[in-house]
Image (spheres, rainbow, N blue to C red):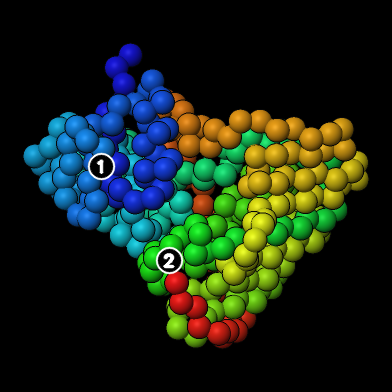
Amino acid sequence: MEPIRIAIVGVGKIARDQHMPAIEGSPSFSLAATVSPHHKGPEGIPHHSSLEELLQDGPAVDAVALCTPPQVRYDLAVEALKRGVHVFLEKPPGATLSEVDALRDRADKVGVTLFASWHSRFAAGVAPARAWLSDRKVQKVSIAWREDVRVWHPGQDWIWEPGGLGVFDPGINALSILTHILPRPVFMQSAVLSIPENRAAPIAADIHFSDTGGAPIHMDLDWRQTGPQSWDIVVETDEGTLKLSQGGAVLTLPSGTEHNEDLEYPGLYSRFANLIRGGRSDVDIDPFRLVADAFLRGERRIVEPFHD
């Protein structure tokens, strides 16, 4: 079977660190081109300054991975879908819920694959955590997702603009795990969003959710963490406590701790290939909807300025 010819649109840190190695290691894909007005891709790979230029004059591609900031993804996705090109959306899948819904409808009409990716769901501990929780009663959940924005997102001003999500850029990873592993749906009850006085998006958030069975869920997000970083989810059940740490890579159950190889992005690309070959899409917006709810109902508190 011939590999799927894919182009990466947006050659920033996530594309270089994760997408390119995953594509290089996948027998299902070949990197046909890169697109960016700012950064060139690997030596020897055709590069174009715009997606329009690639689709008109560049090498043939079957799919694109959109690794740009979310504020500009809609127009790029529409351009690709018009040409019958499959689309991989980095997280979050867009700047608004309604534009992602519109993209899903468009992909269905033209018969190509749209994949809203959630890389943290492919962390090693997530699938076994979901299986273990499936027949247990969840009593309480605590999430601590605290990291240093200067380390992980240096100089990325788009994150602080409307649609960039602020601290929810990493926080949505936790929500993508939460909505995947819990047996019941989750909804938001209250939130406090801490917004620097010189920014448009929050640098921290304290949120209370509940599942439909009444289990309380508390989420602590903070981008001001120095020293050790925290990406932990603790689920208390009627049969003991489950903990996912290191962003889902390490799973601790009452029976012990499991450490497995981190294959998040290879897992994403395996899923994308299977969707393309099966003629299907996967556009789950549940994590994104919870973020939107936090912005809709959350109390905004202005805090000290943040300077990168």
> On the rendered image, what quadrant is the C terminus found in?
bottom left
Disc 1: CA contacts within 10 A as few (<14), some (14-19) or many (>=20) = many
Give coordinates of residue 31: x percent, y percent: 28, 31
Give coordinates of residue 189: x percent, y percent: 70, 70
Report which quarter residue 112 is drawn in. Answer: top left
Report which quarter residue 44 is drawn in. Answer: top left
Tell me the residue that label 2 is attached to.
159
Lower position in the chain sequence, tag 1 or tag 2: 1
The CA span between labels 1 and 2 is: 23 Å
> On the rendered image, what quadrant is the N terminus found in?
top left
Indicate whether 109 appears above or below 78. Answer: above
Give coordinates of residue 175: x percent, y percent: 61, 54
User: Closer to the observer: label 1 or label 2?
Assistant: 1
Q: Amino acid at mark 1?
A: Gly
Q: Is residue 134 visible?
A: no
Q: Nearer the viewer, residue 79 or 192?
A: 192
Tell me the residue that label 1 is attached to.
41
Report which quarter residue 85 is drawn in. Answer: top left
Q: Residue at x 72, y 67 (%)?
A: 208
| Callout 1 touching callout 2 (CB < 8 Å) | no
Disc 2: CA contacts within 10 A as few (<14), some (14-19) or many (>=20) = many
Indicate whether 163 appears above or below 240. Answer: below
Give coordinates of residue 278: x percent, y percent: 42, 25
Indicate whether 17 appears above or below 190. Answer: above
Q: Residue at x 72, y 51 (%)?
A: 233
Q: Amino acid at mark 2?
A: Ile
